[in-house]
Image (cartoon, helix red, strand yellow):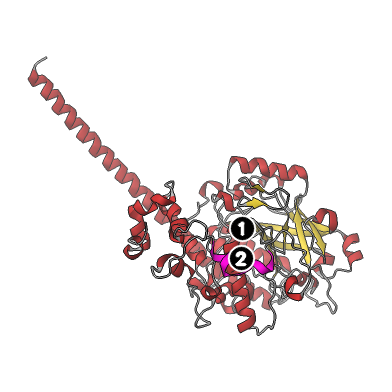
């Protein structure tokens, strides 16, 4: 073979490779452009859907003014949810994790307190979050992703009559809208924190009454299980039915991830109670109110002497049901898809029991043994996922202003929780898990929406916090893994995205 031929062939090969490379590059560019265009198209659609909830807010106001029935009002929201539905193949993955953590890490007492007060009727009241007024004020800090269904609360007549319960605890309610969610996205495997928020609608000029139940604050797969002796390290578990859910939230010993979340919860509540509500005692923010469902009948009439339980628990309808969700959790972490898979089993004619409901005025960690079975929560429609609904529908928390047992000089029944004597700045910020000090929550001006935790713990080079055990900067632990992806936290400072994300001032202080 001649040298000329070889060179010619080589030249042709190089040219072919160049052409192929250029073609591939052009093809990649086209695909990137197409993907970008598709993303922009989806974003525009979702933005429009988010805004369209303004129509539902106005319709709900009119329905209240016209004394509509509870189901009529519930269906205004439900119809909007269905209209803005994402099919399973279209479900959005969690957005930028760093951004969400930063959003969660900030927030003053006022922004926290919005969870308990809602907004004025003109802004959406207790049903729908305001649209583009002050985004920082109404952004959902946790439980960002969920799935919704129409529900009914079916009561055990014999049990509620014996207990003397009134209102919806006595009558039940066919006009419920429930949202199943986790405090953090399901993909964050060690922080899965199931919760159910349910709106109970009644007739007349009344907004919904909300009952919120959850098990713990820190996630059911993180830390050590200290409910048994000896304690053992928990395993990854995304089964929505592993634990009961209750209106009294656990702040579990051995679960360090709960420390950060609870610190913000606790200090915000105390700031409001002392400075705004002028209470002269420290109340227990772990306990959400459940008695509001006893105060009015479904036809809107008020009850002179209402009676409802102090504590409620949701438990799996059967052991087989719990095992079924355990198997689904092993196949994929997105709990929304677990509930979507029930579609063929649910209809108005054949409601599907999702939870047994227990009640008592005395706390117990074993409700099926110590409390009374008062009814069931049953789904009457298949579940729907809606990004717009996740952003706009608001579930108002009902706070219960009860004193912490230890503050009253009583023995605490919450033996699986951190003791009150341990609730302090040292516990809350020593582990770098988004814990705050009291001063981080307290605003200089009450109308201020932002707290300063992220700034002082991570972005402020003059106030960098360090982990109490390792002595390492909290910035490495909080930001490192998220920025560097699969890299180890210690390698995060070598990633060029660090400077882009946190700025050159912080980046030069990272080891």
The magenta segment is: 419-430
On the rendered image, what quadrant is the N terminus found in?
top left
Mark 2, residue position: 262
The part of the image, by quadrant, that contains residue 325 is top right
Magenta residues, dominant SS class: helix
Q: Hey, which residue is sitting farthest bottom in the picture?
A: 278
Task: For label 2, count other residues whose C-alpha is less than 10 Å away and answer few (under 14), some (14-19) or many (20+).
Answer: many
29 over 13 or under it: above or below: below
474 on left or right of 461: right
Can I make out residue 96 in this image? no
Task: For label 1, count other residues whose C-alpha is less than 10 Å away and answer few (under 14), some (14-19) or many (20+).
Answer: many
Q: Residue at x 79, y 74 (%)?
A: 295
Q: Secondary structure at mark 2?
A: helix
Asked whether 202 or 470 is in front, the reply is: 470
Asked whether 455 or 409 is in front, the reply is: 409
Magenta-span inclusion, residue 3: no
Can I make out residue 85 in this image? yes
> Is mark 1 in CB contact (under 8 Å) with mark 2?
yes
In percent of width and height, residue 323 lies at 71, 42
163 on left or right of 433: right
Q: Residue at x 58, y 58 (%)?
A: 257
Spatial CA span between label 1 and label 2: 8 Å
49 over 110 or under it: above or below: above
212 over 19 or under it: above or below: below
On the rendered image, what quadrant is the C terminus found in?
bottom left
Mark 1, residue position: 218
In percent of width and height, residue 72 lies at 70, 67
In percent of width and height, residue 450 lies at 49, 74
């Amino acid at each position: 073979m001649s040298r000329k031929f070889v060179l010619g062939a080589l030249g042709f090969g190089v040219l072919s490779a160049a052409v192929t490379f250029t073609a591939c590059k052009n093809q990649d560019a086209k695909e990137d452009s197409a993907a970008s265009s598709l993303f922009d198209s989806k974003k525009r659609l979702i933005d429009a859907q988010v805004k369209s909830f303004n129509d539902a807010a106005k319709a709900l106001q009119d329905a209240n003014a016209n004394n509509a029935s509870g189901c009529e009002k519930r269906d205004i929201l439900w119809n909007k949810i269905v209209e803005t539905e994402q099919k399973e193949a279209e479900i959005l993955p969690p957005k930028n994790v760093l951004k969400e953590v930063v959003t969660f890490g900030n927030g003053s007492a006022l922004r926290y307190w919005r969870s308990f007060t809602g907004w004025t009727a003109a802004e959406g009241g207790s049903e729908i979050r305001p649209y583009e007024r002050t985004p920082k004020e109404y952004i959902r800090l946790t439980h960002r992703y969920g799935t919704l269904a129409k529900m009914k609360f079916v009561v055990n007549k014999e049990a509620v009559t014996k207990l003397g319960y009134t209102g919806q605890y006595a009558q039940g309610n066919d006009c419920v809208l429930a949202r199943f969610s986790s405090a953090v996205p399901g993909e964050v495997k060690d922080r899965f924190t199931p919760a159910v928020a349910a709106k109970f609608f009644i007739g007349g000029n009344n907004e919904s009454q909300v009952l919120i139940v959850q098990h713990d604050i820190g996630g059911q797969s993180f830390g050590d299980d200290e409910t048994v002796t000896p304690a053992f390290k928990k395993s990854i578990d995304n089964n929505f039915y592993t634990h009961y859910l209750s209106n009294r939230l656990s702040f579990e010993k051995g679960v360090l991830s709960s420390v950060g979340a609870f610190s913000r919860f606790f200090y915000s509540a105390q700031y409001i109670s002392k400075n705004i509500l002028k209470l002269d005692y420290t109340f227990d923010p772990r306990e959400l109110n459940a008695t509001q469902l006893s105060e009015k009948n479904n036809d809107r009439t008020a009850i002179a002497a209402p009676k409802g339980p102090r504590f409620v628990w949701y438990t799996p309808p059967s052991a087989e049901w719990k095992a079924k969700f355990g198997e689904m959790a092993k196949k994929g972490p997105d709990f929304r898809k677990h509930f979507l898979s029930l579609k063929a089993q649910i209809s108005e004619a054949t409601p599907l029991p999702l939870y047994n409901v227990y009640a008592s005025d005395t706390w117990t960690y074993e409700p099926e043994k110590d409390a009374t079975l008062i009814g069931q929560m049953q789904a009457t429609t298949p579940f729907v996922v809606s990004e717009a609904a996740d952003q706009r529908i608001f579930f108002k928390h009902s706070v219960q202003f009860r004193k912490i047992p230890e503050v009253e000089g009583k023995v605490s029944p919450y033996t699986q929780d951190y003791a009150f004597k341990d609730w302090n700045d040292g516990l809350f910020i020593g582990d770098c898990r988004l814990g705050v000090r009291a001063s981080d929550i307290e605003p200089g001006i009450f109308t201020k929406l932002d707290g300063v935790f992220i700034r002082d713990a991570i972005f402020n080079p003059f106030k960098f916090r360090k982990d109490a055990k390792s002595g390492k900067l909290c910035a490495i632990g909080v930001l490192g893994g998220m920025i560097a992806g699969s890299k180890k936290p210690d390698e995060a400072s070598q990633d060029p995205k660090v400077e882009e994300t946190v700025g050159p001032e912080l980046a030069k202080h990272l080891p």
